[in-house]
């Protein structure tokens, strides 16, 4: 989730932006411990509903996508740096992903919604495609973004629209989460997160098209690195201006269709794959809007100085992401403060914003004294164990 080599300030800041938005979403979700506060006054209930809807409109399905895009970009930067030294990075990168999987499993003890383990497994798919030409890589990314599995499901549903689909498999696992997250046993919560919780997230990711989209975004991030789209320059700025326009034009009808699909399609069997596809495309389009706006503001806007404050957080994204889970589980789960019972989305948004500010301040302080974050340094050293130290 960060590389010491080939640092691009805008990439660090954009990754920091994603960390902040993830922090806000995870807090208003009580870190996946969903609970409606009883007895809230009508005005607060209405405010909570508005906060929830706005936060998920802005960041739901987009923050993780930014991370996936930058994950692919980082893979390219690291591979390119080693290639220039006449070395093949792929075997070392596979080891690096195994280490990331280990970090992810530790993180999953505190928060079952961990994305690191999923990135580590899917990231292995980058190794066989790393040397494809740009055109072939773009074509493969486009096919994956189209959600090929959902098209097969849709084709089958159109032949049998009357079939009852039943609840998604992930719901069975999510239904058991409160049994151990609301209790006062930390060990029981850890065990539940590593078993039932992990299965819930894996099933949910598959059911919502995340697996294909993540791999597609990895590949698009590689292409962005090859084309220098995050480097300062007129050509890159033209690309992001055009991307902003195209993504906006694409998002508006997709979001409208996504909203109206339940009214347009009566068959649940037909509607489910359609919703999955349109939601993934809608989120992708809006993610591009966010990235394009961020890059243009960073490279040439009046907010450049403010956005640079996010760069230290982006450089320490692994440490920050892991810390979020530890702090969040203690704040909301039953073995900690148990605030899930008394905090709605509005209060949780304030808690998330405060934690994000503290993380930004801590990361800036840490990086004035160290070259990397604590987990980043550990990951870096373990990656290159037994090898000559990389430049």
Image (cartoon, rainbow, N blue to C red):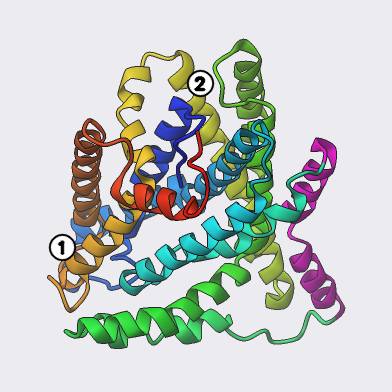
Q: Residues within 10 Å of mark 1 (few under 14, many from 20)?
A: few
Question: Which residue is at 63% across, 39% downward?
Answer: 76
Q: Nearer the viewer, residue 262 or 185?
A: 185
x%, y% of residue 30? 28, 65
Residue behind mark 1: 41
Vertical placement of residue 232 versus 384, above or below: above
Disc 1 secondary structure class: loop
> In the rendered structure, which segment of residues is drawn in magenta?
133-159
Q: Earlier in the sequence, mark 1 or mark 2?
A: 1
What is the distance, in whole Å, between disc 1 and disc 2 at their CAs?
42 Å
Residue 224 sits in quarter = top right
Residue 180 sits in quarter = bottom left
Residue 42 sits in quarter = bottom left
Q: Main secondary structure of the magenta part?
A: helix
Q: Which mark is residue 296?
A: 2
Question: Which residue is at 26% across, 36% downward?
Answer: 370
Disc 2 secondary structure class: helix
């Amino acid at each position: 989730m960060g590389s010491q080599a080939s640092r691009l300030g805008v990439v660090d800041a954009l990754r920091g932006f994603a960390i902040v938005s993830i922090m806000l979403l995870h807090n208003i979700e009580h870190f996946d411990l969903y609970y409606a506060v009883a007895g809230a006054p009508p005005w607060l209930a209405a405010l909570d509903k508005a906060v929830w809807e706005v936060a998920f409109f802005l960041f739901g399905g987009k923050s993780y996508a930014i991370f996936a895009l930058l994950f692919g970009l980082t893979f390219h930067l690291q591979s390119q740096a080693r290639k220039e030294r006449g070395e093949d990075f792929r075997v070392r990168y596979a080891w690096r992903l195994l280490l990331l999987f280990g970090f992810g499993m530790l993180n999953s003890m505190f928060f079952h919604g961990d994305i690191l383990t999923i990135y580590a497994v899917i990231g292995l798919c980058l190794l066989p495609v790393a040397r494809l030409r740009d055109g072939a890589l773009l074509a493969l990314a486009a096919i994956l973004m189209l959600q090929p599995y959902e098209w097969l499901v849709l084709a089958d549903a159109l032949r049998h629209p009357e079939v009852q689909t039943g609840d998604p498999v992930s719901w069975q696992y999510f239904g058991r989460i409160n049994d151990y997250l609301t209790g006062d046993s930390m060990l029981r919560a850890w065990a539940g997160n590593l078993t039932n919780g992990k299965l819930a997230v894996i099933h949910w990711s598959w059911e919502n098209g995340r697996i294909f989209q993540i791999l597609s975004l990895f590949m698009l991030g590689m292409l962005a690195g090859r084309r220098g789209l995050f480097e300062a320059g007129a050509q890159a700025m033209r690309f992001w201006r055009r991307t902003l326009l195209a993504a906006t034009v694409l998002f508006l009808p997709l979001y409208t269709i996504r909203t109206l699909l339940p009214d347009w399609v009566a068959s649940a069997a037909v509607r489910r794959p359609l919703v999955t596809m349109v939601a993934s495309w809608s989120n992708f389009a809006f993610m591009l809007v966010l990235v394009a706006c961020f890059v243009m503001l960073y490279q040439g806007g009046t907010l450049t100085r403010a956005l640079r404050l996010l760069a230290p957080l982006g450089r320490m994204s692994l440490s920050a992401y892991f810390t979020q889970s530890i702090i969040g589980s203690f704040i909301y789960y039953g073995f900690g403060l148990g605030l899930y019972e008394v905090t709605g989305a509005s209060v949780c948004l304030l808690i998330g914003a405060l934690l994000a500010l503290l993380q930004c301040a801590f990361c800036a302080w840490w990086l004035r004294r160290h070259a990397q974050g604590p987990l980043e340094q550990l990951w870096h050293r373990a990656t290159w164990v037994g090898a000559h130290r990389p430049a």
